[in-house]
Image: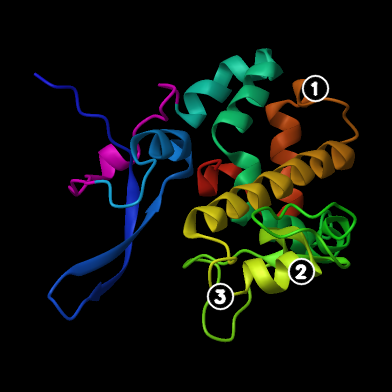
Amino acid sequence: MTDITAVSGTRRAIKELVDGTIRVQVDIDPRFRRQFFDLFPDIDTAVALAPLSPQAAAAPSPTGQTLESLIQPAAVVAPNRLAEFLHISGYFRSPKLWTAMDAAGIYTEKQHKAYIETLSCVGWGHLECNGDVCLHHVKTAANSGVGYKPPHFYGVPLCFRHHRDWAHGTGSLCATRKDKQDLLERAVAITAENMKASIKSHLKIESLRELTLEKLHVFEDTIGLPITKWGGA
């Protein structure tokens, strides 16, 4: 019998194409991010869909540990277990955390934009860098729409030429779909690192290994995002 490996997600928007094809948007649970890219590295990979019961949807993460089973009581005794969970669960990569941090003024979109513009251009391809670096917003179906620009937290640094001719250009020099996916990964990685650094600074700790469940709950109360209400990722 062949083992079947799967990742969970949530069915979102649906669109029926002219030929009758049904195109569905699926949001993948952040806990399964790494497994998703391992299973579906390429566009047009065949998939199978099946509904999950509420019990299955609340199943443990790929590590075999739920938030509560990892944190209580083990993480209270050993804070490094809590730090491990925050990393593997994608805690710092969550747009919910980013929004809460911005609203609380701990790490804002304005600060992030200013930081991005101090970095070197991350563009590649057949173009040489030219011009000042600006923040390029990486769009996804979930973070943008008509008249709606993605938050600065989805930004990457691009020089004028790469921004105009590569990211927003057309023809053979423009960014491919894979390029844009790679830019999205860079944007999320940059924001996640800055969120982590800002939280450590706010809590006055040098390492996440110093973080306890009690400190985490106090912090989340401060930003109005209790971990028990959004699952930790």
> What residue did someone put label 3 on?
170
Which comes before the other along the chain, label 2 or label 1? 2
User: To which quarter of the image does residue 108 belong?
Assistant: bottom right
- Comparing labels 2 and 1, the label whose residue is closer to the camera: 2
Q: Mark 3 is on which residue type?
A: Thr
Question: Residue 193 placed where, x, y %?
Answer: 75, 41
Residue 36 covered by magenta stretch: no
Q: Is residue 147 above or below residue 139?
A: below
Question: Residue 203 placed where, x, y %?
Answer: 86, 37
- Residue drawn where x is 17% and y is 81% of the image: 18
> What residue did someone put label 1 on?
210
Question: Residue 114 placed where, x, y %?
Answer: 88, 62
Query: Do residues under tags 1 and 3 come within 8 Å of each other at their CB atoms?
Result: no
**Hey, which residue is sitting farthest bottom in the picture?**
147
Q: Mark 1 is on which residue type?
A: Glu
Name the foreground residue: 213 vs 17: 17
- Residue drawn where x is 75% and y is 64% of the image: 103
Query: Do residues under tags 3 and 2 come within 8 Å of each other at their CB atoms?
Result: no
Q: Quick one: SS at disc 2?
A: helix
> What residue did someone put label 2 on?
161
Answer few, some or many: residues within 10 Å of disc 1's Cα (few below 14, many 20 plus, some between 14 and 19).
some
- Residue drawn where x is 55% and y is 73% of the image: 144
User: To which quarter of the image does residue 131 belong?
Assistant: bottom right
User: In the image, 193: left or right of 226?
Assistant: right
